[in-house]
Image (cartoon, rainbow, N blue to C red):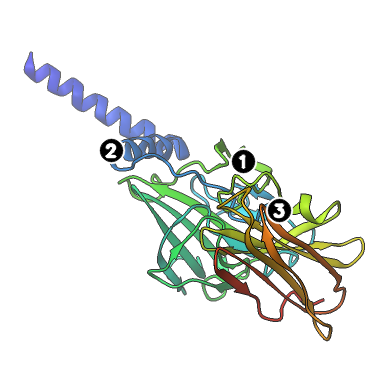
Amino acid sequence: MRLTSIVKAGLALLLGVTAGASTGVATASAATATGVASAAMAEPAFQLPFPCGQTWTGNSNASSAHQSWEIDFNRGSTPDADLGDTVVAAAAGTVVISAHQGSTNGFGNLIKIDHGGGWYTYYAHLLTRSVSVGATVSQGQKIGEVGNTSKPGNNIAPHLHYEVRAGTASYPANIQKAKFNGVTFGYPTQTVTSKNCGGSSNPYTPEQVCGAGYSVIDSAALGSAGTVYLLYNSSNGYNCVTTLKRTSLGTDTATSAYLEVQGKSRITDSGNFGYYAGPVRASAAGTCVKWGGSAGGVSYNSPLEHCG
């Protein structure tokens, strides 16, 4: 009786392995679920890895290198339209990899963030990396820019390769389905608008402050006190800057926002505000700008950038 049971168990195991070998991603998904249950805590509240208000299209089938729930993100209509666009942290955490992977895995410039509880996010092919190993980042903080770096000889179009991994299983079984703002990504492809607004309960959005026609093109976290946003209106060539508070909401505290078009005087809105500073607008078509702001005693000052 015991021998029969052992044989049956072995046969079931053999059949399970055989079936698994023929189901590909489904096997990875099942193994992932087991790995998460045994090794990872509750999933962080991930947001889209792009500034608040931006709309991006993700595709899990865009690359032959994908083996599971990886996503490639683009938003432009031409191959190089996204090159240099801001990438932000999907959730708060600690940077554990910030390096060019060379020929190791084809990731090129890679940022890996440890979110605790066995959860990690990967941001690959970056043009630039803005954070170093050991840095603590907040949700919505800029960590790099969209690029097309990879292994030598691998010519790819600019995009962000994004992954969520958790659990004790090995790759690719440890890759999880991505969630943004609590909603599972609509695999294999979906267009998503970022709610990565720094975890703010501020009732205002950057687009509401700056007005119709403006879209976020960059942002910078001001610690936990707020986020400063740079927006652009393609119909009139104007930039707009606003600083949205995240703490002391409804209480007037020192907050500022500024915009400086190359060759022109800086325009600043500074004072004690309950929810935001700005909007500060100026025509910047064909020129570079400096922008920034402050909240809670923390300031951000950009270099001369976003030219043309």
Quadrant assignment, res 252 = bottom right
Image position, residue 88 (x, y; %): 57, 60
Judge whether residue 16 can be spotted in this image: yes
Q: Which residue is mark 1?
A: 188
Q: Which residue is mark 2?
A: 38
User: Mark 3 Cα within 10 Å, few/some/many (few <14, many 20+)?
Assistant: some
Which disc number belongs to residue 22? none
In front: mark 2 or mark 3?
3
User: Mark 1 Cα within 10 Å, few/some/many (few <14, many 20+)?
Assistant: few
Residues 228 and 285: in front is 228
Q: Which residue is mark 3?
A: 54
User: Mark 2 Cα within 10 Å, few/some/many (few <14, many 20+)?
Assistant: few
- 145 sits left or right of 124 in the view: right
Q: Amino acid at mark 1?
A: Pro
In front: mark 3 or mark 1?
3
- 234 sits left or right of 131 in the view: right
For the N terminus, the quadrant is top left
Q: Amino acid at mark 3?
A: Gln
- 290 sits left or right of 112 in the view: right
50 shown above or below 59: below
